[in-house]
Amino acid sequence: MFGRLLILLYAAVSYAVFLVSFGWAVGFVGNTNLITGKSIDVGVSGPVVEAVMIDVLLLALFAVQHSVMARPAFKRMLTRMIPKAAERSTYVLLSSLVLLLLLWQWRPIPTLVWRLDGIAATVLTGLHWFGWLLVLTSTYLIDHFDLFGLRQAIFAVRGTEAPAHPFKTPLLYRLVRHPLMLGFLIAFWATPEMSVGHLLFAALNTVYILVGVWLEERDLVAQFGASYERYRQRVPMLLPRLVGSRFNADGEASPAPRSNP
């Protein structure tokens, strides 16, 4: 029982570290970080070439850690060394620590690419915050506490393994297959002031998201088979269809004309 409680404590600490990193990331991207005083365009700068190299390396480290640890083969290897109930919390903890490193060591490149005022600035700021809201909402639609390892730890305390979720497509997942990633893209790109550093951050994260989604969908097809293949045919990947999608009585999207996601 003591070991099970340690898993729960570990999960809670990992989740707390995630909350810190996520809160900092929101302020970092939006240039509204009042606690640390450091954001995507504010902080110690330096020569542009040096800043680009450091920022690219930080983003690459973040992408590699996320992608490698999310693969089923790595999970199987990891659970030979730690309890299965702690695997997700370990992923969350290490992901959060790498994100904190990125936010701490980021080198701003504040040269402006564009600056908008008036109604355009208001619209883009609203879209930016809508993106973060979409991210948060999406985590709850797919089970927020399972996503961050708390559900697995709670079941471990009970002495059982958390049952796998069945394949389902709640609300936003009937419009796009990856609303969480769509939220990140909106939050990263929707800004009235786009600097070179911000553009680098948004562009490389977009590449990472597209590659990550491709890897994730390959795993989902292997896990759910024909059910996920039919889902991919019905629902676009990131951009919702404005017309052509309907929902039937059981909540699944009815077939619509095929289009590239």
Image: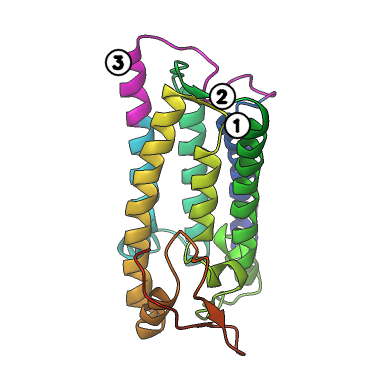
Name the spot of residue 122 as percent of width and height, x first: 67, 34
Q: Amino acid at mark 2?
A: Ser
Would residue 28 be found to the left or right of residue 241 on screen?
Answer: right
- The numbered dot on residue 49 is 3
Would residue 130 be found to the left or right of residue 77 on screen?
Answer: right
What element does badge 2 sit on? loop
222 or 121: which is nearer to us? 121
Question: Along the polypeptide, which appears first: circle 2 or circle 3?
Answer: 2
Q: How many angstroms separate mark 2 from mark 3 (CA)?
A: 19 Å
Name the spot of residue 147 as percent of width and height, x first: 55, 61
Q: Are marks 2 and 1 in contact (CB under 8 Å)?
A: yes
Is residue 186 found inside the magenta-colored segment of the image? no
Would residue 61 be found to the left or right of residue 180 on screen?
Answer: left
Which residue ends up furthest to the top in the rendered image? 47
What element does badge 3 sit on? helix
- The numbered dot on residue 30 is 1
Location of the N terminus by quadrant is bottom right
Location of the C terminus by quadrant is bottom left
Question: Along the polypeptide, which appears first: circle 2 or circle 1?
Answer: 1
Q: Which residue is mark 2?
A: 39
What element does badge 1 sit on? loop
Q: Amino acid at mark 3?
A: Val
Provide the residue span drawn in magenta: 34-57
